[in-house]
Image (tube, rainbow, N blue to C red):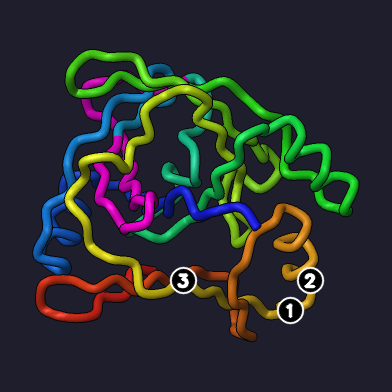
Amino acid sequence: MSSLDHLVLATPDLAATVAEVTRLTGTRPVPGGVHPGLGTRNFLLGLGEGAYLEIIGPDPEQGAPEGPRPFGIDGLSEARLATWAIRVEDIDAAVAASRQAGYDPGEPRDMSRRTPGGEQLSWRLTMDAERGQTGLVPFLIDWGRAAHPAANLPVVPLVGLEALHPHPERIEPHLTAVGAKLPVKAGNRPSLAATVFGQSGLVVLH
């Protein structure tokens, strides 16, 4: 199985969501960087065991991007746990294996962002344009030789991650195809819920 890389908490108001996560967990996320051309920036919070929470929203210092912002941000009225990512070492091989198993995670794409220190951080991830880069099935990410963002982050330990879907049996084969492990329960609509251990106890992000 591949390992959890990060959870994506998408928001229409980055500052407000960072403040709310800080209030709930007792730990303030740190600035991650800017995504040039996508109209977004992010803040990060460690989850332990090499994973992290990405809080991503519109960057007020960038103009409107040519296309829609990722993770359905432009259509959000409030923050939501939009999707998650698993880390792989050879993304091309992982994509080929997933397709052979019956699920197409999308084409790998080169991505980058500027860190607060001005450094350029690059990686590759699968882009699923049809689903708008959201959903219960994680996208794949390959950091190559880049320093992983989870290093040196303040940590709020992840206790559990689970999902709801009207038809769990439709999602489970796709999870298996990409090498992901996620409990999926029957529910009215697709959603993710992450439980973390904050300074005052358990906190559920969804």
Using the rendered view, name the quadrant where residue 21 is placed.
Answer: bottom left
Q: Is residue 69 above or below residue 180?
A: above
Residue 78 percent location from the top left of the image: 33, 59
Specify whether residue 54 is painted magenta. yes
Using the rendered view, name the quadrant where residue 172 is placed.
Answer: bottom right
Q: Mark 2 and mark 3: span between their CA atoms?
A: 19 Å
Query: Furthest residue to the bottom?
Result: 186
Mark identifier at residue 170: 2
User: Which structural element holds mark 2?
Assistant: helix
Q: Nearer the viewer, mark 2 or mark 3?
A: 3
The residue where tag 3 is placed is: 161
**Picture residue at 53% right of the left edge, 49% below the top:** 85
Q: Mark 3 and mark 1: span between their CA atoms?
A: 18 Å
| Apparent side of residue 103 relative to residue 109 in the rendered image (left or right) | right
Q: Nearer the viewer, mark 3 or mark 1?
A: 3
Count residues near mark 2 (Cα–Cα under 10 Å), then give few for <14, some for 14-19, many for 20+. few
The three-letter amino acid code for the residue at tag 2 is: Arg
The three-letter amino acid code for the residue at tag 1 is: His
| Image quarter in which the N terminus is found | bottom right
The residue where tag 1 is placed is: 167
Q: Are marks 1 and 2 in contact (CB under 8 Å)?
A: yes
| Apparent side of residue 99 relative to residue 151 in the rendered image (left or right) | right
Specify whether residue 188 is painted magenta. no
Mark identifier at residue 61: none
Residue closest to the eye, 48 or 127: 48
